[in-house]
Amino acid sequence: MMKEIETRIKEVVKDLFTQNKIDLFIGYSKGSLPLTSSPCFITKSEDIEKLVWNSFCSNNLAVYLPRIFNPQPRKKEKIELPRIGILAKGCDARSIVVLIKEHQIARDNVFILGIVCQGMGDRKKIRNDIEITGAEEKNGRITIVDENKKEIELKREELLSDCCIECQHATPPIHDILIESGNQRPAAPKGGGRDFEKKSIEDRWNLFQEEISKCIRCYACRQACPNCYCRECFADQTKPRWIGVTDHISDVMFYQIGRIFHQAGRCVDCGACVRACPMGIDLRVFTHKLVRDAKELFDYEAGVFLEEGLLLATFKPEDKQEFISEP
Amino acid sequence: MIEEKIIKKNRLNAMLQELSKEYSIYIPAGENGDFRFCELRDTNDELVFWDYRNTRISPKEILFPHSEILYEFSRDESHQFSISQNNDDQRKMKNVILGIRPCDARAIGFLDRVFIGEPNERFVDPYYLKRRIHTIIISLACNRPQISCFCTSLNGRPDGEEGADIIAFDIGEEILLKTVTEKGKEFIKESSKWLGNVKKSDIDKKNKIFKESAKRINSRVSVEKVKEKLDDSFEADFWNEIHRKCLGCGICTFLCSTCHCFDITDETSADRGKRIKCWDSCMYPLFTLHASGHNPRPNYKERMRQRIMHKFNYCPENFKELFCVGCGRCIRNCPVNLDIREVINQVSQLK
Ligand code: SF4
Ligand code: SF4
Ligand code: SF4
Ligand code: SF4
C-alpha cells in the first residue's frame, strides 16, 4: 500500500508542476538513517523521484509554511507569495487549518495533498542500545537489522508514536486532493493521558519538575512546532527579559510553562515537540492535558473546522469558568 | 615511556572509592542505552557503562557547563558596590572523567585550544581552566561503534588516544590501561597498588578486539577539500538550498562535542545581580544580535552557513583543525535528518 501511495503522490506532484500550479512542493525524501524520512523541498519536476512515502514520514511539514509566507527580516516592498504544494497527514492538515485561522498562511497559495494517515512510527520506540543498521518495510511489517546482522521483525503497530495511537483525525480535515490509504485504521480508543490527570496536584507538579529537569533549553520543541511562529518568542525577548537564561529548574519551568500554555486550544497533538526533544522528555503529557481540557470544557478541537472561531478568540455566555479561581 | 597496566573490572569499585576521596569522578550513567555523564555518587554501584555506545549529550558539559554564574554583585544603601566570585565549585577541583569516548576526548583537546590556547597565550578562560587543569581524562576505546560514527574520516579512531591522559580498553574480565600523557603516567603511579602488569596475551587480545572495531566503521566522508572549497563559497548558491529543511533548533550545536559558543548575560534586580555565562548557538535568532536590532544572520540560511563555516573553515584557519570529530550526535538527533555528512559531501563537490 505504501508504494502505491508513493506512486500516486509522485503523479499528483508531477501534474502540479506540469500545469504550473505550484513553485515548490514540500514532501519527504529518504532519510540517511534506517527508520527515518526527511523533509524535502522540490522545486523542479526532475527531483520528484526523490519523494518517498513510508511509516516514518512523521515530521509535521506545516512548520515550514509560516516562514515562507512571512520571511524574515520583513521586507518593505510587497513580496510575491509563492505557490506551495504540501503533503499533509491528518495532523499536518490540522496545523494548516490552525495557521489559516490565525492568518499565518494564504490559503489560496497552498495546494494541500492530503493523505489518510495510517499512523507514523517512532524510531525511539526501539531501545537505544540496539544499533539499527538497516530496516525494511513490507505489508505492515517492519524488519530491522542490528549490527550483528540479526533480523528483528516487528508489526508496524508496535512502533507507532504515542500521538498516532491516540489520533482521532487520520483523515486531513482540509485538502485539495485526498489519497485514500485503503484499510482504514479504526479510530483509537479515546482517553490517553488520563494517567496524568488521575494524579494528585502534588504528584503532577513533581512529575512535571522531574521531566522538565532534563531540559537543556535547546528550544527544539518550539522550533519543531508549527504553532510557534512568533517573530520573537517570549523566551528570546531581552527588552525586557522574561526568563532567566540558565538551565536551572526554575528558568526551565518558566520557559516550558509559557510554551505549553501558549498551546491551549491550538495544539493538534502531532507529537512534533516530543519527537524533536533530544533529551527524551515526554512533553506530550502536558500538552495533551490542554487538548483534553479544550475538548471537555469547550467541546473544541484545534484545527478540525476551518469555519469555527478560534477557541481563545471566541466568547459564549455559557462558557465554563469553574477553573477560574479567586486570587 | 608508555606504560600499560591492567585491572580486574570487579576491583575497579575499590579503586574508585579511594580516588573519590580526592577527585570528583564522572562516569556515563543511564539505562536502556541512554547515557549522560554524571558524578559518581556511590562507589558501590556496579559500573554498567562498559558496553555503552555514547552519551546523548557530549561530555563537554563537565568542563563547559550549560550555564554558570561567573560572579555576583550588589549595592548597599550607601551605594557601595561589592562583587563576589562564585565559589560553589571550589569543593573538589580535581576531576576524573572515566569512560569518555575517544572522539569526545579529542574534542576536549580542541576546546583546550579555544579556551586555553597554546602555552603563554594572551587569553585564557579562567572558568574553563579551573576545571580543566586538574582533570584526568581516561577514555574508553569503542568496541561497538554506531552506524552514524565517522571518526575515522576525521583523523580519529575508535581506539584513538588524542585528548586522553589514559586510554582504557575493555578486554573482557579486565580493563587494560595505557598511559598517553605525563599527567596520565603520574596518575597511574599514584594508583599503582590497584594495578597489575599486562601480559603479552592481554595486548594481543586488545589489538584483536579493536582492529575489529575499526573495521565496523563503514561511514566515510572525504574532508580533504572542505576547508579550501569553503574559502570561496561564502556567496555560493548552495547555501540557499542546504538550509531549507533546518528548523533552527540548535540541537546539533548543543549536543556537539566541539561547539563552544557561549553568551554572557547579566541578571539584575534593583540592587543585586549575577553575571552568567551560558551556551549559545549560531542556529538561534539571538546569536550576535546587535543592540541596534540589526541581525547579521537574520535567517536560517546565514545561520547554517555560520555553523558549517565555523567548523570547517574558520577553525581550521585558527586552530589548524576541522572542528568536527565525527561523533555523529548531530546526525542521530537532528529532528529533520539534516545529515552533516551529506553537507560535507556537497561542499566537497562545490565547483
Ligand atoms: S526540545 Fe527538549 S531539551 Fe530542548 S528545550 Fe524542548 S524540552 Fe528542553
Ligand atoms: S539539529 Fe537539524 S534542524 Fe536543528 S538546527 Fe541543527 S540542522 Fe537544523
Ligand atoms: S559536527 Fe556532529 S559529528 Fe561533528 S563533532 Fe559535532 S556533533 Fe559530532
Ligand atoms: S565516533 Fe569513533 S571514537 Fe566516537 S564513539 Fe564512534 S567509534 Fe567511538
Image: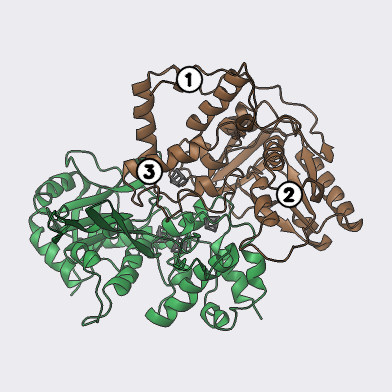
Label 1 residue SS = loop
Horizontal and vertical percent position of residue A77: 72, 66
Label 3 residue SS = helix
Q: Earlier in the sequence, mark 1 or mark 2?
A: 2
Q: Total number of numbered labels?
A: 3
Q: Earlier in the sequence, mark 1 or mark 3?
A: 3
Chain with green colouring: B
Mark 1 near ligand 1 (CB under 8 Å)? no
Horizontally, residue B286 falls left or right of residue A224, namely left
Give the CA distance from mark 1 to mark 3: 25 Å
Horizontal and vertical percent position of residue A120: 64, 37
Residue at 63 percent of width and 57 percent of height: B245
Identify the image quadrant of the C terminus of chain A.
Answer: top left
Q: Which residue position holds label 3?
A: A252
Horizontal and vertical percent position of residue A263: 55, 36
Q: Which residue position holds label 2?
A: A52
Same chain shared by disc 2 and disc 3: yes
